[in-house]
Image (cartoon, rainbow, N blue to C red):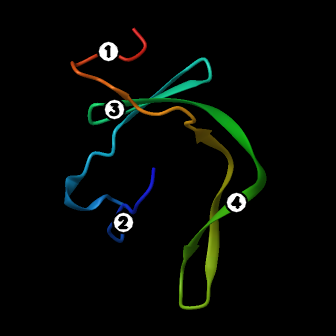
Amino acid sequence: MQGTLSVDDEGVLKDGIDVGTLNQVDGVYQLLVGNHLLEGREVALKKTFAVMDREDDNDFSVTGFIRKKIVFKSRPKPVMKKIKIFE
């Protein structure tokens, strides 16, 4: 995805935006965004990322680690009618 998604202080998307629906079965991921379907797979990151939360001006706490990502290599497929994902 290219671009920016704006969230409020609690991490909720502004304006009630629905980014899409993500489903996973047997290591294959499908992301349905509007009328576009993307298929991807899970890949391990070379370096682990730390998720940090700011407590004060100079204090941070680690809230989690990211070790994997989902890669969507193909172009989105247009979906003309409502479909069931992974029937």
Question: For the point 44% across and 55% down, which residue is it?
Answer: 2
* Mark 4 residue type: Phe
| Secondary structure of the residue carrying numbered label 4 | strand
Q: Are marks 4 and 2 in contact (CB under 8 Å)?
A: no
Image quadrant assignment for residue 7: bottom left
Q: Are marks 1 and 2 in contact (CB under 8 Å)?
A: no
Left or right side of 13 for 39:
right
- Residue marked by disc 2: 10
Residues under labels 1 and 2: Cα distance?
A: 32 Å
- Spot occupied by residue 12 in the image (x, y as percentages of width and height): 33, 59
Left or right side of 70 for 85:
left
Foreground: disc 1 or disc 2 = 1
Quarter holding the C terminus?
Answer: top left
Per the rendering, the mark at residue 36 is 3
| Secondary structure of the residue carrying numbered label 2 | loop
* Mark 3 residue type: His
Viewer-proximal residue among 21 and 57: 21
- Residue marked by disc 1: 84
| Secondary structure of the residue carrying numbered label 1 | loop
